[in-house]
Amino acid sequence: MDILLITGPPYSGKGTQCEILEAELGYTHISTGDVIREEKARQTPIGRLMQQYEEKGELVPDEVMEELLENILLAHKQDKGIILDGYPRTIPQVDTLLRILQRNGLSISHAVNINVPAEELLERAKKRAATSDRLDDRNEQTHLKRIGIFEKETRPAIRYLETLVPLAQVDGLGTIPEITEKLRHIMQQAR
């Protein structure tokens, strides 16, 4: 099974690109954010715990994410491929992901980071807030906090990941089809 890892800041278009690639490649798109929202909607114990962290604008603890991620991967182990969106977000999560993959005889086939400047991220956040029914999208302070957490926690994790697996960098400016084409090009080069 192929594992495609897509990372980047909040509002960079990761989810949109993952959905397009899912349809094109026949892979399963796993957004950790979507899984967390599903857990919260079902009011599972893990969902309630995650909601407490999200309401504070904080990341879910690594131990909780490790359990959730391994369960997800095991549930999809027979799939053609998985597109992992939004994980890892911290340096310890990079190690956790690689440990889970190794434990299950899997590895990352492709890793891509979508780069978008902070000013553009805030514009995209405002646009998404206008069309989204997600409560967490409506607060500009939450947008700023998410971007701040990305810079403090996730950007160093991406740099660390890059020392362990080949990680392609993609310019996330442009139209959705233009960015998709950049991703296709990277995937073709890596084969």
Image (cartoon, rainbow, N blue to C red):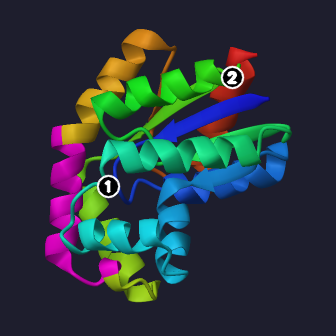
Tell me: residue 47, above or below residue 110. Answer: below
- The quarter of the picture where residue 87 lies is top left
At label 1, the amino acid type is: Val
**Residue located beneath label 1 in the image:** 60
Q: Position of residue 86 (x, y in %)?
A: 46, 48
- The quarter of the picture where residue 25 lies is top right
Where disc 2 sits, the SS reads: loop
Tell me which residue sits at (44%, 71%) in the image. 45
Residue 85 visible in the current orientation: no
Tell me which residue sits at (27%, 72%) in the image. 52
Where disc 1 sits, the SS reads: loop
At label 2, the amino acid type is: Leu
Q: Position of residue 185 (x, y in %)?
A: 67, 29
- Is 73 magenta? The answer is no
Q: Is residue 14 left or right of residue 184?
A: left
182 or 163: nearer the viewer: 163
Q: Which residues are magenta?
A: 136-152
Q: Quadrant of the N terminus?
A: top right
Residue 173: assigned label: none
Name of the residue lying farthest toward the front:
45
Q: Is residue 54 left or right of residue 187?
A: left
Looking at the magenta stretch, what is its main secondary structure?
helix
**Residue located beneath label 2 in the image:** 106
Residue 129 visible in the current orientation: yes
- The quarter of the picture where residue 161 lies is top left
